[in-house]
């Protein structure tokens, strides 16, 4: 008996340990109740994949793995590092250009994609946000973050000069 094509991929993904989207998982569970073909596929896939799942390594295998890693990791790291610096030098400009092109290619699809995930704004919401933004609500935060802290007045700086510089600038 063959599984339904629209559920086959979901069955295999889940049997392989992949987390399905909640809606997909629920739809699959519901479908399995009434579909012997998909149920058989589900059971078969789980059994097959549990056979290829390896048992936990023994202490000896752990030790051998650690030794192998210690021996090979430094060389692998040096190789990767050499590749990285080569890329950084020779290909940085090309990579930046490729990234720009990739971004350009991806951009037009973005609005259509997000439209399926976000509900439309309620009427008036955009205007409300605009009004809020026009009130410059972050001005104080930005000012506090960008204004250097005033130093303590010193004897070299008389109180009036200090006040002119730090307390009432522009007055
Ligand atoms: Zn089915």
Image (cartoon, rainbow, N blue to C red):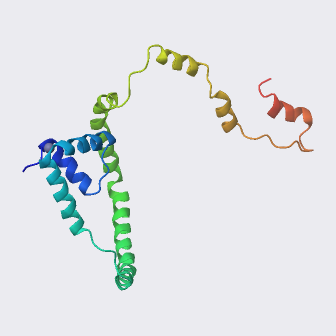
The residue drawn where x is 61% and y is 23% is 136
Residue 131 vertical placement versus 79 (above, below): above
The spot of residue 36 in percent (x, y) is 13, 48
Residue 35 vertical placement versus 143 (above, below): below
The spot of residue 88 in percent (x, y) is 37, 58
Q: Nearer the viewer, residue 28 or 104?
A: 28
Q: Give the tally of numbered discs.
A: 0
Q: Nearer the viewer, residue 146 or 1?
A: 1
What is the quadrant of residue 25 in the picture? top left
Q: Is residue 47 left or right of residue 86?
A: left
Q: Nearer the viewer, residue 93 or 72?
A: 72
The residue drawn where x is 37% and y is 78% is 69
Ligand 1 is found in the corner quadrant, namely top left
Residue 42 vertical placement versus 159 (above, below): below
Q: Is residue 51 left or right of residue 21?
A: left
The spot of residue 115 in percent (x, y) is 33, 27
The spot of residue 150 in percent (x, y) is 79, 40
The residue drawn where x is 11% and y is 48% is 37
Q: Is residue 85 left or right of residue 150?
A: left
User: Quarter of the image containing the C terminus?
Assistant: top right
């Amino acid at each position: 008996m063959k599984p339904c094509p629209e559920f086959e991929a979901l069955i295999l993904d889940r049997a392989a340990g992949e987390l399905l989207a909640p809606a997909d998982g629920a739809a699959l569970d519901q479908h399995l109740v009434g579909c012997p073909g998909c149920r058989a596929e589900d059971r078969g896939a789980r059994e097959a994949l549990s056979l290829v799942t390896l048992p936990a390594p023994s202490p000896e295998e752990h030790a051998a793995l650690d030794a192998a890693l210690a021996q090979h990791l430094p060389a692998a790291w040096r190789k990767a590092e050499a590749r990285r610096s080569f890329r950084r030098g020779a290909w940085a400009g090309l990579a930046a250009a490729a990234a720009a092109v990739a971004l350009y290619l991806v951009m037009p699809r973005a609005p259509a994609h997000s439209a399926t995930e976000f509900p439309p704004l309620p009427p008036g919401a955009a205007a409300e946000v605009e009004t809020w933004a026009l009130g410059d609500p972050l001005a104080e935060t930005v000012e506090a973050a960008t204004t250097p802290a005033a130093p303590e007045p010193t004897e070299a700086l008389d109180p009036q000069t200090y006040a002119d510089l730090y307390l009432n600038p522009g007055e």
